[in-house]
Amino acid sequence: MKGLKPVDRIGGAFGSYRWSGEAVKQVAAELAAMNFHMIDPGPRIQYVPDGAGIEACVDYGKKIGETVLENQ
């Protein structure tokens, strides 16, 4: 994606992990470096999300939707 030089893009990263959970941070850093408008840090959930983890993911999805609508 770096070679494409995207402009006026919205980005965010979220995910579950088993060990360190660094991938979400790395993806977010790469998107920010490409000047994506970053949505709040997304959920990083260890292992399989429980009820609170799923709720965090749903809330993050709502933030993404709200951000998209605000930037139309």
Image (spheres, rainbow, N blue to C red):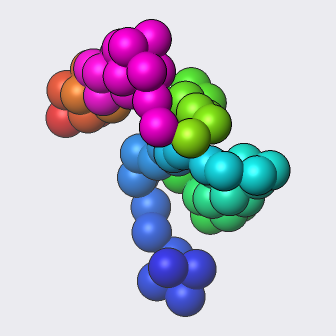
Residue appearing at x 44%, y 61% in the figure: 7
Q: Is 52 situated above or below 45?
A: above
Residue appearing at x 36%, y 22% in the figure: 54
**Per the image, is 41 magenta?**
no
Say whether residue 65 is left or right of residue 59.
Answer: left
Considering the whole magenta stretch, tell me its main secondary structure.
helix
Magenta region, residue range = 48-62
Q: Is 33 situated above or below 36?
A: below
Q: Is 40 situated above or below 46?
A: above
Residue appearing at x 58%, y 80% in the figure: 2
Q: Which is nearer the eye, 43 or 53?
A: 53
**Per the image, is 52 magenta?**
yes
Task: Provide residue 43's location: percent of width, then percent of height.
Answer: 55, 30
Q: Which is nearer the eye, 4 or 14?
A: 14
Q: Quadrant of residue 69?
A: top left
Can I make out residue 70 in this image?
no
Residue appearing at x 80%, y 50% in the figure: 20
Task: Provide residue 41's location: percent of width, then percent of height.
Answer: 61, 30
Quadrant of the frame with the C terminus: top left
Say whether residue 30 is left or right of residue 39.
Answer: right
Q: Is 58 situated above or below 24?
A: above
Say whether residue 34 is left or right of residue 16.
Answer: right
Can I make out residue 10 in this image?
yes
Task: Provide residue 27's location: percent of width, then percent of height.
Answer: 63, 59
